[in-house]
Image: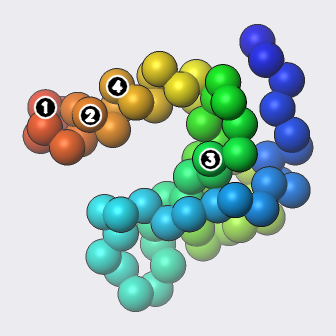
């Protein structure tokens, strides 16, 4: 697995485009890694992040956009 920066120190976090809650209950994604996609809970920005391989994250996003999830 490729080494990435500590996910708590990444500065390139962005809110999910599917976020509709004004209270910040959304996912944030960091685009700062070339091989992996860190994802975190926007309500807990200093908490842990889940790290997905880019291919896995892209497949998940495509499934959401195409409404293919159960």
Secondary element at tag 1: loop
Q: Which residue is mark 3?
A: 31
> How far apart in space, not on screen, are marks 4 and 2 (Cα)?
5 Å
Q: Position of residue 11 (x, y in %)?
A: 77, 62
Nearer the viewer's eye, disc 1 or disc 3? 3
Which residue corresponds to the image point at 87% horizontal and 43% vertical from the top-left? 6
Give the number of the disc on residue 59.
4
Q: Which residue is mark 2?
A: 62
Q: Quadrant of the N terminus?
A: top right
Which residue corresponds to the image point at 56% horizontal and 52% vertical from the top-left? 29
Chain-order first, disc 3 or disc 4: 3
> How far apart in space, not on screen, are marks 2 and 1 (Cα)?
8 Å
Nearer the viewer's eye, disc 1 or disc 4? 4
Secondary element at tag 2: helix
| Colouring of the image | rainbow
Q: Which residue is mark 1?
A: 68
Q: Nearer the viewer, residue 28 or 46?
A: 28
> How far apart in space, not on screen, are marks 1 and 3 (Cα)?
24 Å
Chain-order first, disc 3 or disc 2: 3
* Quarter of image, res 69: top left
Q: Say if 69 sits above or below 24 in the image.
A: above
Mark 3 crowdedness (10 Å alpha carbons): few <14, some 14-19, many ≥20? some
Q: Position of residue 30 (x, y in %)?
A: 63, 51
Q: Are marks 4 and 2 in contact (CB under 8 Å)?
A: yes
> How far apart in space, not on screen, are marks 3 and 4 (Cα)?
16 Å
Chain-order first, disc 1 or disc 3: 3
Chain-order first, disc 2 or disc 1: 2
> How far apart in space, not on screen, are marks 3 and 2 (Cα)?
17 Å
Which residue corresponds to the image point at 80% horizontal and 54% vertical from the top-left? 10
């Amino acid at each position: 697995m490729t080494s990435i920066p500590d996910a708590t120190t990444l500065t390139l976090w962005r809110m999910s485009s599917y976020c509709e809650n004004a209270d910040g209950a959304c996912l944030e994604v960091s685009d700062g890694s070339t091989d992996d996609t860190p994802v975190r809970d926007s309500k807990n920005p200093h908490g842990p992040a889940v790290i997905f391989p880019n291919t896995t994250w892209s497949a998940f996003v495509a499934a959401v956009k195409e409404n293919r999830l159960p």
